[in-house]
Image (tube, helix red, strand yellow):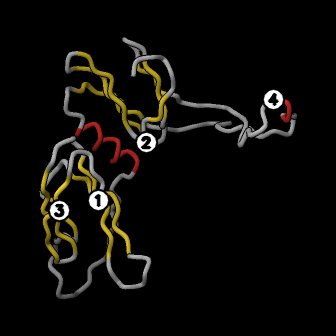
Amino acid sequence: RPDGREYPMQTWVALRENGYGLGIASDSRCAYDATENELRITAVRSPIFADHYGEKARCEDSRFTDQGEHYFTLYLGAVGEDTLALQQTGALLVSAPRVMLSGDHHGTLPQTGSVLSCDREDVEVSVVKNAEDGSGAWILRCRECRGEAVTAKISFAGVTFDAAFKPQQIR
């Protein structure tokens, strides 16, 4: 929406014209505004924290948000009609993979393996958690990212299943 007003962006935003444009992904900046030829990220805002009452209730003891030093990462890149790579970059900036080193140990598991896999790059598995009902079941939250109806083959902890997604559907 190139109207100069501020909008939320989650982890990425793209401004395109005739199928080409600029994409920005961030690890922590979550708002942008755009005009016809500019895309701007809101780096820091400084409103009063929980300002429910307006100027009449403000005093010298009011606390402001976003004060002090800030560190953040921005990725800028060219985008076409497909923003999947930009979405994946935003997801990686927010939640980078963690490596855990372990010493030698003897056991029956193979040297390598996978607990979770999905055969489609346009389906993101964003959450894996235990069910809260105490049943021992697992919950996987997945999202179709390209805007197309697809079927994904997902494997988790030795169980493989097909999941059908509508465009942009979260399951």
Q: CA distance from mark 1 to mark 2?
A: 24 Å
Residue 55: mark: 4
Q: Quadrant of residue 160?
A: bottom left
**Sequence order check: which comes first, mark 3 or mark 1?**
3
Taking 74 as reference, is 146 above or below it?
below
Residue 11 picture location, percent across and down: 40, 40
**Sequence order check: which comes first, mark 3 or mark 2?**
2
Q: Count how many numbered circles sit on residues in the image.
A: 4
Mark 1 or mark 2, whichever is nearer to me:
1
Q: CA distance from mark 3 to mark 1?
A: 9 Å
Q: Is residue 123 left or right of residue 11?
A: left
Q: Is residue 109 left or right of residue 136?
A: left
Decide: few, some or many residues near mark 4? Use Cα within 10 Å; few <14, some 14-19, many ≥20.
few
Given contact means CB atoms under 8 Å apart, are the residues at marks 3 and 2 in contact?
Answer: no
Say what secondary structure mark 1 lies in: loop
Given contact means CB atoms under 8 Å apart, are the residues at marks 3 and 1 in contact?
Answer: yes
Q: Amino acid at mark 3?
A: Ala
Residue under label 3, please give it.
163
Residue under label 1, please give it.
171
Q: Amino acid at mark 1?
A: Arg
Decide: few, some or many residues near mark 2? Use Cα within 10 Å; few <14, some 14-19, many ≥20.
many
Q: Quadrant of residue 134?
A: bottom left
**Sequence order check: which comes first, mark 4 or mark 3?**
4
Mark 3 or mark 2, whichever is nearer to me:
3
Q: CA distance from mark 4 to mark 2?
A: 32 Å
Residue under label 2, please give it.
27
Say what secondary structure mark 3 lies in: strand
Residue 150 picture location, percent across and down: 13, 51
Q: CA distance from mark 3 to mark 2?
A: 29 Å
Given contact means CB atoms under 8 Å apart, are the residues at marks 4 and 2 in contact?
Answer: no
Residue 158 picture location, percent across and down: 16, 77
Given contact means CB atoms under 8 Å apart, are the residues at marks 1 and 2 in contact?
Answer: no
